[in-house]
Amino acid sequence: MRTLRALPVLLLIACHGEVQAPERPATVPPDAVWVGGSEAGAFLRIRPAGATEWQVELYNDATGAPLESGRFSLRGAPLDEVKAQDATGWDGRKILLRNGGWLERSR
């Protein structure tokens, strides 16, 4: 598992109007979705990894370097399925979701 090697990145979307995604670096998987705002962003890939866990991969949007990778569990508001499009931000520890819930690293 990779750990965050940079300062935590705070991603915010939708508050400042629509922001266009940057060009995808070659090292970012094609199914990763860009989430971000006018000041920061990252490519996010979320795949099911069990009944209540998801495999999360987060990539730097400029370089494609991995920022975070591992199994995450849903907390807060319930969802049957979590998709990268549900994400509204990353605070360096949690992936914040539109429904008020979040994903955090499984223990």
Image: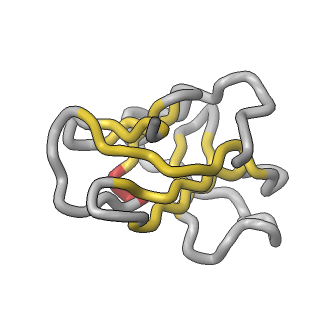
Q: Residue furthest bottom?
A: 30
Name the one closer to the observer, 52 or 21.
Answer: 52
Q: Where is residue 48? Give x, y as percent.
A: 39, 67
Q: Residue at x 66, y 44 (%)?
A: 68
Q: Is residue 106 left or right of residue 101?
A: right
Q: Where is residue 60? Give x, y as percent.
A: 73, 47
Name the one closer to the observer, 88 or 101.
Answer: 101
Q: How many labels were placed on the picture?
A: 0
Q: Is residue 90 above or below residue 18?
A: above
Q: Is residue 95 visible?
A: yes
Q: Where is residue 91? Give x, y as percent.
A: 52, 26
- When asked about the image quadrant of residue 36, the answer is top right
Q: Residue at x 45, y 40 (%)?
A: 106
Q: Is residue 60 visible?
A: no
Q: Is residue 14 left or right of residue 25?
A: left
- When asked about the image quadrant of residue 34, the answer is bottom right
